[in-house]
Image (cartoon, rainbow, N blue to C red):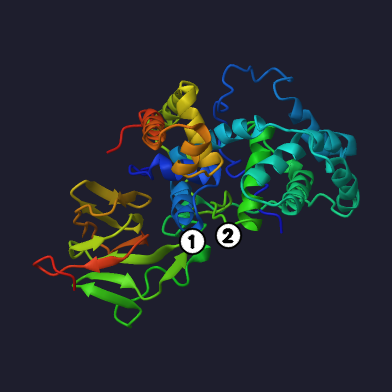
Amino acid sequence: MLSGGCMPFSREPPLPRPLEQDRSSADPDADPFEALVHAVAQDRDRNAFAALFRHFAPKILNYCLKLGADRGMAEELVQDVMLAVWLKAGSFDPAQATVGTWVFTIARNRRIDRLRKEMRPAPDPDDPAMTPASLATPEEAAQLVQSSRQLQDAIGSLAANQSEVLRRSYFLEQTHEEIAEDTELPLGTVKTRLRLALGHLKRSMRDKA
Amino acid sequence: MTLPLHHPDDRHLFGYASGQERAGKSLLVATHLAYCPDCRRRVASFEALCGNWFEELPCPDHDGLDGLLDRMDGLLAGSPMPAEVARPRQAAATGERLVPEPLRGWLPEAIDTPTDDGRWQEISKGVWLSGWERTLSGTTIRLLRMASDAPVPAHRHTADELLLVLRGAFSDEYGSYSVGDVAHYVAATDHHARGASEEDCICLFLLDGDLIFLDEDGNSL
C-alpha cells in the first residue's frame, strides 16, 4: 500500500498558496507541472509521466542519497515515489500545494517508511473527529487567515543564513555538529542562527492565551 | 467551537513537516493537527518551504535513471488508477467526544475505561497513569488521567514531557488547557498540573527520559 500520496487536508478551503503569493492564480502557466499531473490523471498520458519523471526523479534520488540511502535503495525509492505520482495524480489539488511540494511530501513519507522503517502518523481528512476549519467562529477564521499570511511573510523575510541552517537541520536532518563542519562555522554560531530563525518564525504565531 | 489555544512548538511542527521528527512525537503532533486548523496551515507552509528546498536540490547527471523509467513501463501498465471511493463524512457533531486519528487507531483500548478494575495505575489520589505503556522511537507514551481538582504529585523528568488533552481540562501555573491543547515542559522545569474539569481530564502523555515522582521533601519515591 502506498502511503502519503494523497493531499492531507484537501477538504479545507484553499489558502493563499504558500510562498507563491505573487503568482496570479488565474495564470495557467504558474506551475508548468500542474498540466502534466492533470494529463496523467485524466488521460493516463505516458509522455506527461515521462516528463514528470525526468524532472523529479533526479531530485528524489538526490534527496534519498543525502538522507542516507545507498544507490540501490535510492533508486527503489524513486520508483516507489513516481509510481505513487502515477496512481495518485487524481488526488493532486493545486489549491493546496505546488507539484514540487506534493512530490516532496510523497518522497518524505516513503523514505520514512523504507529508510527509517517507521510509520508517519497523519490525520485522516475523512475522520468525523477532525475539527474542520469551517467550524471556526468568524473571529477565529479571520485569525487563521491572518496567521497564515504572517507566517508566509516571516518565511519570505528569513535571512539567507538563517534559512540555510533551517534547511540543513530540518530538511537534511544534519546535527548541529555536522552543520558546523560543513559550513565551517563555529558551533555556537550555528546554534544562534537556528535559534534566531525559529524566533523569527515564532513572532508570526497568533497570540497564545 | 473553540479551537486549541496551546500549540506544539515550531520545532515540532517544522520537524513534522520536513520528516525530521520521529514517530513518537509525530503521533502527538498529528493528533493535535486533527484538532487545530491553524497548525494544519502552519505545517502546510513549512511543507511548501521544504518543497522549495526539494526543487532546489542540485541534480548532477544521474546515469541509469532513463533505464529506471523504462523499467517502470510494466509497473504503470499493471497499475490502473484506483477508482475514487467517496467515503461518507459523518456530521462533526457525532465525533465530538471521539479521539481523532491517527491516535484513535493506535490506542490499545478506549481512553475512559473504569479506574477501579486495575487497568489504571493510581499514582496519587485522583491521578492515574494508564496500565499500558508503549515506546515509539525512544519516546514513552501513556495516558495521564486527573480527577477534578486532583493535583499531579511533584515529579522530576530528565527530558521533555508533552501532554495533549483528549478529554476534560487541566491547569498549571502557565495556563489552562482543554481538548486539543498541548503542554510542553522541558527538562527540569517545575510545573503543577491539576484537573480542572468536572469530568476526569485525560491526556496523551509523552516522555523522552525517566519520570521520577518525589515525596514531600523532594526525594525520589
Mark 1 and mark 2: span between their CA atoms? 8 Å
Total number of numbered discs in the rendering: 2
The chain that hosts pointer 2 is A
Please report the residue visible at 63 percent of the width from the left and 50 percent of the height from the top.
A68
A55 over B221 or under it: above or below: above
Q: Quadrant of residue B56?
A: top right
Q: Position of residue B88 (x, y in %)?
A: 63, 53
A185 over B107 or under it: above or below: above
Q: Is residue B43 visible?
A: no
The chain that hosts pointer 1 is B
How many residues crowd mark 1 within 10 Å: few (<14), some (14–19), many (20+)? few
B174 over A202 or under it: above or below: below
Q: Quadrant of the C terminus of chain B?
A: bottom left
> Left of B130 or right of it: where is A69?
right
Secondary structure beneath label 1: loop
Q: Quadrant of the N terminus of chain B?
A: top left
Dot 1 corresponds to which residue? B137
> Left of B82 or right of it: where is A69?
left
Dot 2 corresponds to which residue? A118
**Labels 1 and 2 touching (C-beta < 8 A):** yes
Residue type at the position of mark 2: Glu
Could you say which is closer to the camera, residue B30 or residue A185?
Answer: A185
Q: Quadrant of residue B144?
A: bottom left
Q: Position of residue B136 (x, y in %)?
A: 48, 64
Q: Position of residue A36 (x, y in %)?
A: 80, 32
Q: Is residue B120 visible?
A: yes
Residue type at the position of mark 1: Ser
